[in-house]
Amino acid sequence: MGKTPQKFKDAVKLIVLCQSVLEQMDTVKGTDLYRHKIKNQINSLEKTMENMIFKPLLMLDHVDEDLFTRIQLNVDMVMDMDVDELSQMRISLDELRETE
């Protein structure tokens, strides 16, 4: 099995970040921050981002059927973390990478 090209890795990261942004924007809905102007901008951005990542997500599913599921599980995990947990995750990853 060959090494995964950097462009593919970067594309997967972009998809993960876009999915995370979409999910985080959902948390703003129904709050005081979600006023008319912000509401329109968020809705417009959501549509643009969803259109942007739809085809790449389909292509990922054809490359590896489990990849999107793993991505979604990891996005869900990160979305459930608080700031302290995110910081700790970074420290843990740095330590893991140093041992590799």
Image: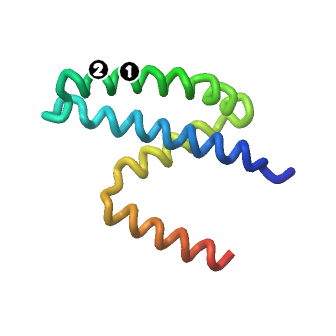
Indicate the secondary structure of the residue bearing disc 2.
Answer: helix
User: Residue lying farthest front?
Assistant: 37
Report how far apart the C-alphas of labels 1 and 2 lie in the structure. 6 Å
Q: Quadrant of the image for the C terminus? A: bottom right
Q: Is there CB contact under 8 Å for labels 1 and 2?
A: yes
Q: Is residue 24 above or below residue 54?
A: below
Q: Which mark is residue 23?
A: none
Q: Residue 21 placed where, x, y %?
A: 41, 39
The residue positioned 72% from the left and 28% from the top of the image is: 62
User: Residue lying farthest bottom?
Assistant: 99
Q: Is residue 89 above or below residue 74?
A: below
User: Residue lying farthest right?
Assistant: 1
Q: Is residue 40 above or below residue 70?
A: above
Indicate the secondary structure of the residue bearing disc 1.
Answer: helix
The residue positioned 62% from the left and 78% from the top of the image is: 98
Q: Is residue 60 left or right of residue 29?
A: right
Find disc 2 in the rendering and name its residue. 40
Q: Residues within 10 Å of mark 2 (few under 14, many from 20)?
A: few
Q: Is residue 78 left or right of residue 95?
A: left
The amino acid type found where label 2 is placed reads Asn
The residue positioned 47% from the left and 36% from the top of the image is: 19
Find disc 1 in the rendering and name its residue. 44
Give the quarter of the image for residue 46. Answer: top left
The amino acid type found where label 1 is placed reads Ser
Q: Is residue 4 left or right of residue 65?
A: right
Q: Residue 41 placed where, x, y %?
A: 32, 25
> Which of the colour schemes (rainbow, by chain, secondary structure, one colour) is used?
rainbow
The residue positioned 59% from the left and 73% from the top of the image is: 96
Q: Residues within 10 Å of mark 1 (few under 14, many from 20)?
A: few
